[in-house]
Image (cartoon, rainbow, N blue to C red):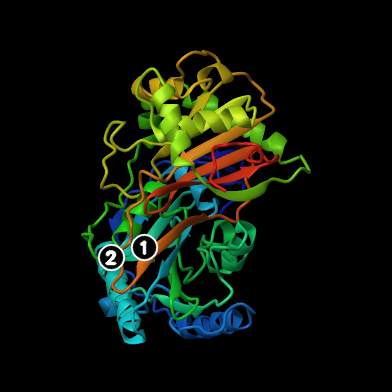
Amino acid sequence: MNSVPNARLRIVVDDMLYISKFPSTDHADEISSGVDFTRRRSCCRVIHAWLTSVHLCLGFVKSINLSFPFPPCATPSAMKSVVLPLMPTELSNVHSPSISTLTFFNTTAPVSDTNQSRTFLQSRVDAIVQVNPWLSGQIQTSAHGGSRLVLRYDANTSSLPVEIISMPALSPSLEYEAVAGMLSSLEAPQGSDVVDVVHAALFRVYWITISSSQSALFVSMAHGLGDGYTYYRIYGMLSADARVEALLPDRVDDFQRVRAAAISDIDNVLSMLGRAARQESTKDERSRRTLHTIDPAWIANEKAKASRMVSTNDILTSWFFRQTKADIGVMVVNLRGRAEGLEPHMAGNYQTVVAYQPEDFATPGLIRESVRHGMRRACSKELPHDVRTVSLTTSWASLYKQVVLPAWKMAEHWPITNGRSMFSNGAVIFQRTPDSIGVLMRTKHDVAKQSTLFLP
């Protein structure tokens, strides 16, 4: 990042937590306005050709469509530029790894029908970006100076190309690390690869051909555009049976106040997590990512044992914190519908965390109680100043909407993350198949080895 000065270490709060350097936020809010933007993207074709050559050099990519998903080039007269200030709290999200998923599809349809499905997917992406043109935007340093960032986009954007590539070696039977590594070059950028980078593609859609009977959909969104909730609202619109809707990209000016009102000790929580992340960054011990399918019989048995209603997320969150022997357990929560002025139609980063000590996550019922009573710990009071082991969970399962594509049947859905976690352990709970829940774990030790929670 060239023109944005580095300041203090802060914590990134979202689907996984990371630490990064990002600018200070001690500046007045920038006034949003529509600005006539007449700069022609003259280097688009040159960059396009260069990136295409880079992709063709990758051993696992056999072919590539020459329409890399850049924001569409447009003549000055056709453009209507909008400059939208990001929230101070989103500066850290810009430096977070992208939000990405891979969905495997199977088919028995003839080639002509599968080709029509590609056409449908492109038309669907175009329809989405036409009502959500901010997906084609660029994150830039504010023209007013300081450390504020803005999202600049063309309100008249009409298309965003779907990339078509071939990966015959891609398979759901591969180890997670192998699959994530194969897709790392396709992910939307982060940090210095985003800010003030001309034609950085912040929202990317790939159709990956594996064989005549199997393909995959890879969708990646830069974190500066929004959180996991935002991602899945857009992802769900790709489905043939879903309605394409416009999400509101304008940010809430006083989100820090709204967040503090919803979770009274959030500033103390973030400070504690910042110290824990800095401590973790000095350790040499590396974590390992593993993907598992939850045994529904085990979940049913845990629900039957509970004295009152608990959710699958309550059960898995309590289990994960206990298995990893966390000093502090951190659960990511979406504040839309739970805090003043935050509504379901809002795009952006409106997530935060609830922190638990061991007495607060001893049972699934205690997690449920904390959610029922204003996202506050059920038992403990003050959090410790320093901690050794922090474990984090986030659930994507409730956000997921199955993508229905003509001639194809969804087989498996995976979260894809290649960023480094700055906490001891992390887990993403997600919808793996139409009728099964999965969990992606990043742990220092193999907590799944002797567990009866997972299917073989």
Residue 22 in picture, x, y percent from top left? 57, 46
Residue under the point 59% across and 34% down: 391
Task: Please say if 335 is above or below 455.
Answer: above
Residue pointed to by mark 2: 128
Q: Are marks 1 and 2 in contact (CB under 8 Å)?
A: yes
* Distance from Cα at disc 1 to Cα at disc 2: 9 Å
Query: Closer to us: mark 1 or mark 2?
Result: 2
Using the image, tell me which numbered label, if any, was put on residue 203.
Answer: none
Q: Nearer the viewer, residue 235 or 18?
A: 235
Residue 297 in picture, x, y percent from top left? 44, 37
Q: Residues within 10 Å of mark 1 (few under 14, many from 20)?
A: many
Circle nearer the N terminus (1, 2): 2
Tag 2, which secondary structure?
helix
- Asked whether residue 74 is in view, the answer is no
Tag 1, which secondary structure?
helix
Q: Is residue 280 left or right of residue 105?
A: right
Residue under the point 37% across and 54% down: 434
Residue 281 in picture, x, y percent from top left? 71, 41
Residue pointed to by mark 1: 135
The amino acid type, in three-letter code, at marker 2 is Ile
Q: Nearer the viewer, residue 396 or 40?
A: 396
The amino acid type, in three-letter code, at marker 1 is Leu
In the picture, residue 322 is in which quadrant? Answer: top right
